[in-house]
C-alpha cells in the first residue's frame, strides 16, 4: 500500500453539486461566472441544495424560510455573552454552532426532511451568530435579524446596526456566491467524513468550521490582510516578497491544490478589489496586491486563489480582519450542508488505510526496564 500525500488527485466519491473541470468551476453545471454576474446568493443556496435554479415561488419560499429562521435561541445568545472576548471569531463560531444543536429539538432526527430544515436553520443562523459575537466582544448589544432581508443585507445590518449601502450588499452577495462551494475541499471533505458515520448534521458542520479555520484553507484570507497591513506601502512590496521567496516561506493567498493555471474566482475578486478600494480612497491596497501578484506569479508561477483579492475587498467593506474567515463560513455553509445531505442520501463510511512506516516486531518491555 502506498500513500498519496495529502490525497492529491484521489477521487473520493461521486457528487452532483459542484465540478472543477479543466479549471472551470460550475455549481450544478452552471459556470460560476454566470452566477457571479446574475444570481443572488439565495438562488445559489437553492441550486446547491436542489441541483437546479429555483422558480420564483421556490425562491420566495426559501427566502421566507431563511428570514424566519435567522434569530438564534436566547440560550445560545446568552452563552455567547460569556465567551472570552479575545478568542478568534472562528473559535466562537465553532462553539456557537455546536451549542445550536443543544437547543434544536430535531438535532437527532435523521430524516431527509428534518435535515433539510436543519440546513435552513444553520444557513440562516450562522450570520446571526457571527454578528452577535462581533458586537458583544466590543461591548455592543446584538442586533436582531430582519425577517425580510437577504443573507447579505441581514449580516451587514446585524454587524453594523445600520442599513447597509447598496454597493456593500451587491459586493457581499457576489463574494458569498464565489465562496459557496468547491467540491471536496478540506472542510467539506471533513464534514462528509464526519457525517458518513451517520452522526448528526451539526457534528459535520463543527468539523467543517474547525477545518476551514486553518491558514492553508479559509484562514488564508486573514493572513493576506495581515500581510497587506505588514507591508504597508508600495515601496515595501518588493523587499517583502523577495525576502519570503528567498526564505522559501509561503505567501498566503497563492497556490491551489486543484487549480494550477489560476482560480476562476480570483478575477472577480480582483475586479471588485479595484473598484472598492478606489471607492474608499485606498487604491494602494489594490495596487500592492497587484504588485505582489505580479511578483509571485512571475517568479514562482503561482497564481492567486480565492483568498487573495478577497482580503482587500473585505477591508474595503469595512470588515474587521478576523471576521474574514467567518464570512467565508457563512457562504460555505450552503456547500457544507448540500454535501452533508448528499452524503446521507447515498452513504458509505469513509475510512481509508494508512501506509504504516513505524517500527515492527517490537515487544512489551516492563516499565522499569525501559
Ligand atoms: C479557500 C482555499 O482554501 S484556497 C487556498 C488557501 N491557502 C493559501 O493561500 C495558503 C498558501 N498556499 C498553500 O499553502 C498551498 O498552495 C495550498 C495549501 C493551497 C496547496 O497546497 P499543495 O497542493 O499541497 O501544494 P504544496 O504546499 O505541496 O506546494 C507545492 C510547491 O509550491 C510551493 N508553494 C505552494 N504554495 C505556495 C505559496 N503560497 N507561496 C510560496 N510557495 C508556495 C510549495 O512550497 C511547494 O514547493 P516545493 O515543491 O519547492 O516544496
Ligand atoms: O478547494 C480547495 O482546496 C480550497 C478552495 O479553493 C475552497 O475551498 O474554496
Image: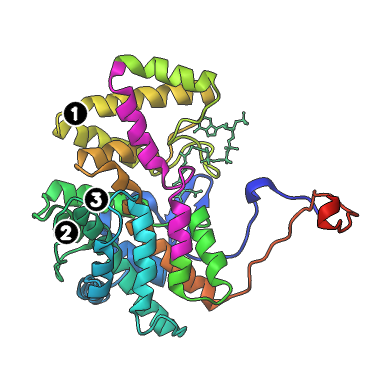
Between residues 99 and 18, which one lies in front from this camera angle? 99
Disc 3 crowd rating (10 Å Cα; few below 14, some 14-19, many 20+) is: many
- Magenta segment boundaries in residue numbering: 206-234
Marks 1 and 3, how far apart in space?
Answer: 19 Å
Q: Is residue 53 magenta?
A: no
Marks 3 and 2, how far apart in space?
Answer: 14 Å
What residue sits 54% from the left and 60% below the top? Answer: 189
For mark 3, give the secondary structure. helix
* Quadrant of the snapshot with the N terminus: bottom right
What residue sits 32% from the left and 52% below the top? Answer: 89
Is tag 3's residue or tag 2's residue first in the polypeptide sequence? Answer: 2
- Quickly name the residue at label 2: 158
Disc 1 crowd rating (10 Å Cα; few below 14, some 14-19, many 20+) is: some
Marks 2 and 1, how far apart in space?
Answer: 25 Å
Q: Is residue 196 left or right of residue 107?
A: right
Badge 1 residue CB within 8 Å of ligand 1: no
- Quickly name the residue at label 1: 282
The reply to whether dot 3 and dot 2 touch (C-beta < 8 Å) is: no
What residue sits 50% from the left and 66% below the top? Answer: 16
- Quickly name the residue at label 3: 172
Residue 153, horizontal then vertical, whole percent:
17, 58
Between residues 75 and 47, which one lies in front from this camera angle? 75
253 relative to 182, above or below: above
Residue 210, horizontal then vertical, whole percent:
45, 56
231 relative to 23, above or below: above
What residue sits 53% from the left and 18% below the top? Answer: 246
The quarter holding residue 314 reads top left
Amino acid at each position: 500500500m502506498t500513500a498519496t500525500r495529502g490525497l492529491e488527485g484521489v477521487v473520493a466519491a461521486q457528487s452532483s453539486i459542484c465540478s472543477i473541470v479543466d479549471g472551470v468551476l460550475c455549481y450544478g453545471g452552471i459556470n460560476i461566472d454566470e452566477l457571479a454576474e446574475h444570481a443572488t446568493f439565495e438562488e445559489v443556496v437553492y441550486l446547491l441544495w436542489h441541483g437546479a435554479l429555483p422558480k420564483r415561488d421556490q425562491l420566495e419560499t426559501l427566502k421566507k424560510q431563511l428570514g424566519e429562521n435567522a434569530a438564534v435561541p436566547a440560550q445560545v445568545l446568552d452563552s455567547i455573552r460569556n465567551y472570552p472576548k479575545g478568542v478568534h471569531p472562528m473559535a466562537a463560531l465553532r462553539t456557537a454552532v455546536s451549542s445550536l444543536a443543544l437547543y434544536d429539538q430535531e438535532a437527532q432526527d435523521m430524516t431527509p426532511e428534518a435535515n433539510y430544515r436543519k440546513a435552513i436553520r444553520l444557513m440562516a443562523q450562522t450570520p446571526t451568530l457571527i454578528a452577535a459575537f462581533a458586537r458583544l466582544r466590543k461591548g455592543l448589544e446584538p442586533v436582531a435579524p430582519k425577517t425580510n432581508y437577504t443573507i447579505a443585507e441581514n449580516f451587514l445590518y446585524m454587524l453594523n446596526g445600520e442599513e447597509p449601502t447598496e454597493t456593500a450588499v451587491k459586493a457581499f452577495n457576489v463574494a458569498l456566491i464565489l465562496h459557496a462551494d468547491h467540491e471536496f475541499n478540506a472542510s467539506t471533505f471533513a464534514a462528509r467524513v464526519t457525517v458518513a458515520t451517520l452522526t448528526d448534521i451539526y457534528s459535520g458542520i463543527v468539523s467543517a468550521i474547525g477545518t476551514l479555520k486553518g491558514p492553508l484553507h479559509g484562514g488564508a484570507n486573514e493572513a493576506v490582510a495581515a500581510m497587506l497591513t505588514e507591508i504597508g506601502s508600495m515601496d515595501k512590496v518588493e523587499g517583502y516578497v523577495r525576502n519570503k521567496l528567498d526564505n522559501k516561506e509561503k505567501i498566503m493567498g497563492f497556490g491551489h491544490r486543484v487549480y494550477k493555471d489560476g482560480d476562476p474566482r480570483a478575477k472577480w475578486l480582483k475586479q471588485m478589489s479595484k473598484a472598492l478600494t478606489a471607492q474608499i480612497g485606498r487604491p494602494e491596497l489594490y495596487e500592492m496586491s497587484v504588485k505582489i501578484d505580479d511578483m509571485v506569479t512571475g517568479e514562482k508561477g503561482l497564481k492567486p486563489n480565492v483568498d487573495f483579492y478577497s482580503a482587500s475587498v473585505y477591508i474595503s467593506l469595512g470588515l474587521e480582519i478576523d471576521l474574514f474567515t467567518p464570512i467565508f463560513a457563512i457562504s460555505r455553509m450552503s456547500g457544507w450542508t448540500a454535501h452533508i445531505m448528499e452524503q446521507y442520501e447515498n452513504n458509505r463510511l469513509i475510512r481509508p488505510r494508512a501506509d504504516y512506516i513505524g517500527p515492527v516486531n517490537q515487544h512489551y518491555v516492563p516499565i522499569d526496564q525501559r
